[in-house]
Image (cartoon, rainbow, N blue to C red):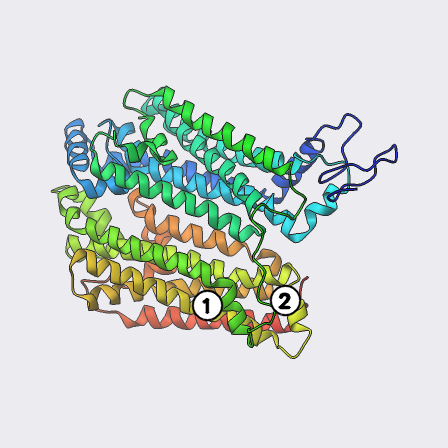
Amino acid sequence: MTGTGVLNGRGRPTTGTGALNGRGRPTTGTGVLTRLALRRDRLTLPLWALVTGGMVASGAGSLEGLYGTAAERAEAAASMTANSSMRALYGPVFGDSLGGLVAWRFGTFGAVLAAVASLIVVVRHTREEEETGRQEMLSAGAVGRRAPLTAALLAALALNTAIALLIAAGLAAQGAAGALALGLAIGGTGMVFATAAALAAQFTESARLAKGLSAAVLGLAFVLRAAGDAGSADGSSALTWLSPIGWAEQVRAFAGERWWVLLPIAGAVLVQTAAAYALTARRDVGASFLATRPGPAEGRLATAGALAWRLQRGTLLGWSLGFLLGGLVFGGMVEGAADLVGDNERAREIFERMGGQSALTDAFLATMVSLLGMLAALYAVGSVLRAYGEETSGRAEPLLAGALGRLRWAAGHLVIAFGGSVLILALAGLGLALSYGHDLGPVMGAALVQLPGVWTLAGLAVLLWGAAPKAANAAWGVAGLCLALGWIGPALGLPQAVLDLSPFGHLPKLPGPEMAWGPVLLLTGLAAALTAGGLAALRRRDVAG
């Protein structure tokens, strides 16, 4: 018998990851696993679809308030396309209709959100299932070798189909062809990264590494697209064409649709799917093609904190480099903010709602800092939930069986989560100051003032982990909702009461206005209370594993 196969009805061993039926079909059990995946994600998949598809579909209403006449839209399109900083962030404007502006303003970020959701879904139902041992149990039954991967891709396909349909239906009034093209471009981009995640899952032994590798590919695609668009006003740069996000942009929805650009998107999906299928047929459950490097013969980790650092140092390094680069990029965009807005009072109002009632340049800088703060919350939540992953995988139980207490063990991971967020935001502030040429002090202060919001969401993750571990992953949804409220909410004209649901909505909008210590101290105290509550609950409950 090889791998984790079992005996078939004739007494002969099967090969691969599970028993096949009499005809040896490798996709046996796909329907059952697909229904299981959809049931497990019955809340998160609709939420992702509504946030992504709804954000794009509702963009027409908000932009109509900004640019109510054809002349205003044409002027805005010309100024946005002429601004290299804005092209780097959103891409060039290919059409000055209302639909064309929606595709420009929301298309890139819609594609990124679809990609993030898709890679999370695929890794969750492939490598994460193998890492926890659940896939091995399922594969002992009548489950074909390729059934788990197929089920994961079908779940991602259902998600991206829903996103595409929501966009097509929501923007149909602006032109059915353009709405359909934009929906297919964004949904197709999601599938490109879903299949990329399926491929990454074959090379790594942990879900964390698979997500990290997929996210790195997504980040590279965004950077290539941004660099290409910054250097070319018509989108003809070779760098843009090297990026799947650039392909979605080049469909040119509402601007003489290029339907043929959907072919490279479909081709990438098919090629990556075929490669993932070929690789999954050549390995055992739980194995990978990039084996984990064995550690030294004699251990040197004397404390729980040292172990936590060893486990999370690679992730922290990646986030640190990304935030430093992001600060440098955003700092270079600050001077172009005034050229983008011009005399448009509605656009100025949006930036001021996002960045405060200061001068426009400071408001734009505060907006970028706030965005980096919300992204830092994703790091902090993920770092906290790494400890939860150590618990559910059974690796924490042997440690806690000895003299190591739960609080000391948890504290090692929490120091990385809370302290690491300080480091990455400080690096973002440094990058902003270097690129913008502003005094380091005010910019660094603007970056670090985001910490209470970051810590509040991290504290919520600690509370969920300690008090309701089965709901711990809901912290991702809360962090994602805060990101959507902060980045998209002002452009959609959401009421201030809705925007204030995010802790970042209460922080002072620096640089510019005077420092307001009240909200900062209140949120810091709330973060401490949430963390303390989570740790107290962790001490009282049983350890999973």
Quarter of the figure with residue 303: bottom right
Q: Dot 2 lies on which element?
A: helix
Residue at the farthest left position: 343
Label 1 Cα neighbours within 10 Å, binned few <14 / some 14-19 / many ≥20: many
* Residue type for callout 2: Ala
Number of marks in the rendered image: 2
The foreground one among 270 and 152 is: 270
Q: Is residue 533 visible?
A: no
* Residue type for callout 1: Ile
| Spot occupied by residue 241 in the image (x, y as percentages of width and height) | 32, 31
Q: Against 206, is 92 above or below?
A: above
| Spot occupied by residue 128 in the image (x, y as percentages of width and height) | 60, 49
Q: Which residue is mark 1?
A: 416
| Residue positioned 25% across, 29% down in the render | 236
Sequence-first disc among 1 and 2: 2
Disc 1 to disc 2, how far (Cα)? 17 Å
Left or right: 120 in relation to 170: right
Q: Which residue is mark 2?
A: 396
| Residue positioned 55% across, 41% down in the render | 122
| Residue positioned 72% across, 28% down in the render | 25
